[in-house]
Amino acid sequence: MTLVPRMQLFSPAQCVGYGAFVLGVVAFTQRTDRRLKLLQASQALVYTVHFLLLGNLPASASALLSSIRSFLALRTRSRLLAATIIGLNIAAGASFAKNGAGWLPVISSCAATLAIFYMQGVPMRLVLLGCTTLWLANNVISGSIGGTLLELVIAAVNASTIVRMLRTSPERPVCLRAS
């Protein structure tokens, strides 16, 4: 990985990252789990190409597995499939990660797999918010402009969506009820 191509604002790698940015922002504005998963799967597929162009193989492999996971999660909540995807992520990390930073997207993808297959609504989005911080660190380290912006915006949009969902929920916490 070299710094020069990554830091060019309109290099092919960065332009693909901007495409992922748009898809990711739209995904996390969704209040419907199905639309969130569909758009997130599409965003992760674009991320796969982005990180491949940046030379970040652990992130590219994790993004590809995240895309496959999210598309499959639209059809099934199979525990075996979730375990398989987590195993594949760990294998990809073992194959491609050269240092601790290489494990950031792998850990994020594993946690997101658990959230997408076993959770829904606000709890799922809270785990995904934690995963966003891991991807943010990866993107800063990788020199991904669109990816860094994406994760910052996803964190803000996801947090806002969580608050909106809690406010409209009949079982919302006392601290979020109108006075």
Image (cartoon, rainbow, N blue to C red):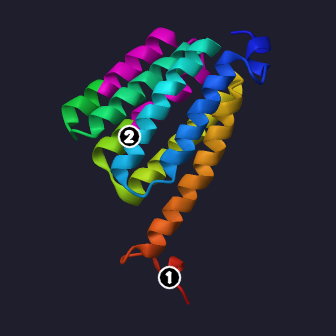
Tell me if I can see residue 28 in this picture: yes
| Residue 50 position within the rendered picture, expressed as x and y whole percent measured from the top left | 58, 21
Q: The residue tagged with tag 2: helix, strand or loop?
A: helix
Q: Report the number of discs.
A: 2
Quarter holding the N terminus is: top right
Magenta stretch, main secondary structure, is helix
Q: Is residue 18 covered in magenta? A: no
Nearer the observer, 175 or 165: 165
Residue 138 is left or right of residue 120, and the answer is: right
Could you tell which of marks 2 and 1 lies nearer the N-terminus?
2
- Residue that lies at the very extreme toward the bottom in this rendered image: 179
Which segment did they paint magenta?
85-112
Which x, y percent locates residue 20?
A: 56, 32
Question: Is 22 placed above or below 143 here?
Answer: below
Residue at the location (60% across, 36% down)? 21
Q: Which label sits on residue 38?
A: 2
Residue 92, percent from left and from top: 42, 15
Q: Position of residue 179 (x, y in %)?
A: 56, 90
Residue drawn at x 62%, y 27% as measured from the top left: 17
Q: Which residue is mark 1?
A: 177
* Residue visible at 45% across and 13% down in the picture: 94
Q: Residues within 10 Å of mark 1 (few under 14, many from 20)?
A: few
Q: Is residue 98 above or below residue 34?
A: above
Residue 4, image quadrant: top right
**Amino acid found under the numbered disc labelled 2:** Leu
Query: In what element is the residue under mark 1?
Result: loop
Mark 2 vs mark 1: in front: 2
Going 48% across and 81% down the picture, which residue do you hit? 174
Identified by mark 1, the residue type is Arg
Residue 137 appearing in the image:
no
73 shown above or below 2: below
